[in-house]
Image: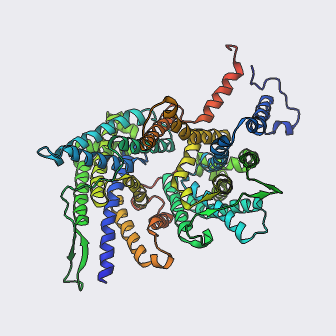
Amino acid sequence: MGFFVEVLISGLMAGVLYSLVALGFVLIFKASGVFNFAQGAMVLFAALTFVRLLDILKDTFAPITLALIITIAMMIMLAMAIERLVLRPLVNQPGISLFMATLGVAYFLDGFGQTLWGSDIYTLDIGIPRGSIFILESVFEGGVLVAKEDLVATVIAGILVVTLAIFFQRTRIGRALRAVADDHQAAQSIGIPLNYIWVIVWSVAGLVALVAGVIWGSKLGVQFSLSLIALKALPVLILGGFESVLGAIIGGLIIGSGEKLAEIYLGPYVGGGIEYWFAYMLALGFLMFRPQGLFGEVHIDRV
Amino acid sequence: MFYREAGQFKTSYKADQAMFPIFQDKIFVAIWLFIGFVVVPMLANEYMFRAIFIPVIIMALAAIGLNLLVGYCGQVSLGSGAFMAVGAYAAYNFMIRVPELNPLICFLLGGLSATAVGVIFGIPSLRIKGFYLAVATLALQFFTDWTFSRIDWFTNYTPSGSIAVRPVEMLGVVFDSPMKKYFLCLVFLVIFTIIGTNIVRGRIGRAWMATRDMDVAAEIIGIRPVFAKLSAFAVSSFFIGVAGALWAFVHLGSWEPLAFDINLSFSILFMVIIGGLGSIVGGMLGAAFITLLPLFLNQLPVWLGINISTAMISHLEFMIFGALIIFFLAVEPLGLARIWQITKEKLRLWPFPH
């Protein structure tokens, strides 16, 4: 039983990390209806920028803060560039064209980040504690082994989600964002500038990408494979629903724990490595019963 | 004045329903067939066959197949690499396990296996729509990647997991030289293009297009969505499966599961979008564009005499590729096929002003 809980907890924590990436997708899809495949590339780009700046600035008085500020500035500039060069020319195009355009952005960012910052593997250390601790020793014999960095990551992810929720519910910009998400035309007609909203939402997605990139980067090292995390976040996304922040979190937890449990308990019977597709099959199974995901909006088609 | 239908009267239904009712179209197709079957083999060298013509033709076949699904039936699929893999591995297994079978039949059986998989994975499309479906098709992609790399039976227990095949022999001809391979692929492409063109202008194609434009409305006017969607998946995956068998046996010769990974799926989707959704010609143009662009970008620094490292070239290639995709989508969202259509419309009047 202790082992089961251990696997479950490590799965849940991996799931939180998937949710972090999925959150970026959800934010952009809600506000602009764009299925942003470049989110993974943004994670890589943010992490690369951050880790290299950290290296350049290591002799200054506050390298982490400075690197963070500059990286955030770069992500905002990136958001502006995407709005100006990609979204604006493609206004009113079908969703699939926009999706393809974000694939183009993903290719561009992958190339650009590595041209600018090099393509080696960088280790990222911003003082997240390492090693493992035992918890719940009173409940299970021998306790449950948990990695410290996973705990920290979970806490950071939690803070991020709460901040985003407050930002969306309580601030003026947040209300404008939700209005745009509900209805583009109605929002525009009451004077909400769409372009400005898009810049903001892509910037927020950039920040989420930065957080995800830093956490994943300190776990795995900053390298090209970070951009493939997007593929891990997609099943989370369809399971939770494209339009729901809550869905991204719950979907992440379901996918993360399901994937780890399946790998441990089912994997040995079929030759292992089923992590690669299990999440997708799980999400596909869920979708057969709820085609819009757990918390997605139900679209009613009228003829 | 060079391209117009004025004065070309149809006196029978047969003439009216011909594949190319306009005389100029017939000439045009004849010219392209002439170029494909006569001019290219005379002029091209071995490298050009191997690096340019054979991949472009096979990819064109795959892109036409995917276009039937995405462009005509409106079901976005990111799993075309998986269908190619199924086609290739099924053809391989038929070939080694039933040696009496002609490779031609093995290729078609490979296509049929892809069809079977396509129909099974098409079933979710009855419930799931739009991007949810697109992501769901990735399930197939990852599942086939895993299946062909982990289950040794499919690779006939080769220790490395990669497969090497001898040149195929069909109808008494061994296809070993690049030129013979080129002819083989070209014949496949021509036959499948004729089939594809006729499907999309017939009853099935119209059912697909109605489903694409609005599935609820299509259902109300009496088109069965189960039939329309599943038939689109079936036909499309048959095309892609045959293309996969050709890609593996004729183009690659030896391959491993990574040859059919998600990047291949994305490039085929790029071909369809850049070429033009809902256009057979678009599939071919897109395939040519997407296959040739990396070759061109790779050679560009050499031509310009700039000396940069290979790693840098590949990063820059990524950048330029991405930027060009965005540029193309912004300038002509309807794809290369639209440019071709505009040209034809212009040619109706040109060189006269009205």
Instruction: Measuring from the top left, give residue B33's x and y in whole percent.
Output: 77, 37
Instruction: Measuring from the top left, give residue B32's x and y in whole percent.
Output: 75, 35
Q: Residue extending furthest left?
A: A61
Q: How is the image coloured?
A: rainbow
Q: Residue extending furthest top?
A: B353
- Would you say residue A119 is visible in this rendering? yes
Q: Residue at x 78, y 35 (%)?
A: B34
Which image quadrant for residue B15? Answer: top right
Task: Name the quarter where the C terminus of chain B is drawn.
Answer: top right
Question: Is residue B303 or residue A251 the one in the foreground?
Answer: B303
Q: How many marks?
A: 0
Q: Residue extending furthest bottom?
A: A141
Which image quadrant for residue B164? Answer: bottom right
Instruction: Measuring from the top left, give residue A165's x and y in whole percent.
Output: 25, 53
Q: Residue extending furthest right?
A: B11
Say if A31 sits above or below B96 in the image: above
Q: Is A7 left, or right, of A128 in this rendering?
A: right
Q: Residue at x 29, y 53 (%)?
A: A122
- Would you say residue B276 is visible in this rendering? no
Instruction: Measuring from the top left, give residue A69's x and y in whole percent.
Output: 20, 43
Say if B270 sits above or below A195 in the image: below
Question: Is residue A161 or residue B32 the one in the foreground?
Answer: B32
Q: Residue at x 51, y 55 (%)?
A: B262
Task: Name the quarter where the N terminus of chain B is drawn.
Answer: top right
